[in-house]
Amino acid sequence: MDASTTVALNDGVETPRLGLGVFQVGPDEAAAAVRTALQAGYRMVDTASVYGNEKGVGRGIAESGVAREDVVVVTKVWNDDQGYDATLRAFDASAAALGLDYVDQYLIHWPRPRLGLYPQTWRALCRLRDEGRVRSIGVSNFEPEHIERLIAETGVAPAVNQVELHPGLHQGRIRAFHADHGIVTQAWSPLGRGQGFLSHRAVAAVAEAHGRTPAQVVLRWHLQLGVVPLPKSVTPERIRGNLDVFGFELDAAEMDLLTDIGDGYRVGPDPSLLFDVS
Ligand SMILES: NC(=O)c1ccc[n+]([C@@H]2O[C@H](COP(=O)([O-])OP(=O)(O)OC[C@H]3O[C@@H](n4cnc5c(N)ncnc54)[C@H](OP(=O)(O)O)[C@@H]3O)[C@@H](O)[C@H]2O)c1
């Protein structure tokens, strides 16, 4: 496995094993981070309309010198744009902001079950895929029940589900469901968004044993779980270091050490709770 290794989605499209995240990054900083990442060998970038930086992401791709067709661009329809027609309009706005005529992965950002619009939103994504404007369609923060409803109503399973996942939150139930349905798990906040996982003594011990950074061993843990991590950084040295995770391996005991840090620690909202993220 190296930085160019891909995984096949359930629609046959290949996707990289790791991508750059740009949450809470302004457009100019996003352009610089994307340019740095693509020039360092990244081939996937994760943004969302609500991040407000799609223009910057598009600029970074254009400035990187990497061919458009070699880059997997992920963006997401925001909660306020759910529903069939609103989603089609939101997609047009995202594609225009990115400066792209197609998007590689278009995801529903949150299910918002009380709003009840996610099946219609999903139908709009199916249409965009059928029209070739999106290569793969997926979801984010969906629980198995939400995905089951999509499959029951449309017969189409998402290619990916992007969820919070790191050594403090393993998402075992969701990963098992994904395995049964051929859905690729993407990890958001894979580094725990600065909440202390990187300085945990277990991470430090494994990092020291391999002569690697804490972030590198945490990202390696994701890869060996079969998860696609989307680490965010605007720091060029970290951007490059976070991709350099293909040349070493954690043994079973080291995987357990990181897994044993705990489970159930969230840095973001819990989609299973009875409130809507807006
Ligand atoms: N679908 C969703 O609902 C959802 C929600 C949240 C996030 N996401 C996606 O997932 C991506 C990643 O999640 P995240 O941004 O929340 O958090 P994260 O990637 O877990 O952590 C980012 C933080 O870690 C720092 N960092 C990065 N590399 C590091 C390294 N090698 N050593 C030490 N610190 C390092 C970054 O600092 P610097 O930038 O200063 O280097 C930043 O403060 C997002 O950017 C977004 O694309 C999706």
Image (spheres, rainbow, N blue to C red):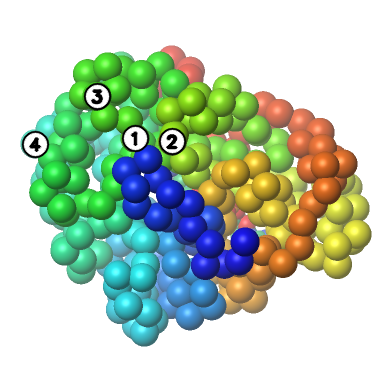
Q: Horizontally, is 16 left or right of 74 in the view?
A: right
Amino acid type of the residue that numbered disc 2 sits on in the rendered structure: Ile
Q: Which residue is mark 3?
A: 155
Q: Are marks 4 and 1 in contact (CB under 8 Å)?
A: no
Residue 212 position by quadrant: bottom right
Closer to the camera: disc 4 or disc 2? 2
Q: Horizontally, is 242 left or right of 255 in the view?
A: left
Instruction: Count residues near mark 2 (Cα–Cα under 10 Å), then give few for <14, some for 14-19, many for 20+.
Output: many
> x and y percent of residue 187 in the render?
54, 44
Closer to the camera: disc 3 or disc 4? 3
Real-space Cα separation, disc 3 to disc 4, in angstroms: 20 Å
**Quadrant hosting ligand 1:** bottom right
The C terminus, quarter of image: top left
Instruction: Count residues near mark 1 (Cα–Cα under 10 Å), then give few for <14, some for 14-19, many for 20+.
Output: many
Instruction: Count residues near mark 4 (Cα–Cα under 10 Å), then give few for <14, some for 14-19, many for 20+.
Output: few
Real-space Cα separation, disc 3 to disc 1, in angstroms: 10 Å
Whichever of callouts 2 and 1 sits on the residue coming sooner in the sequence is 1
Residue 103 position by quadrant: bottom left
Residue 24 appears in the rendering: no
Q: Residue at the spot x=57%, y=67% of the render?
A: 3
Location of residue 43 with respect to 141 vertically, above or below: below
- Count of number-bearing discs: 4
Q: Which residue is mark 2?
A: 183
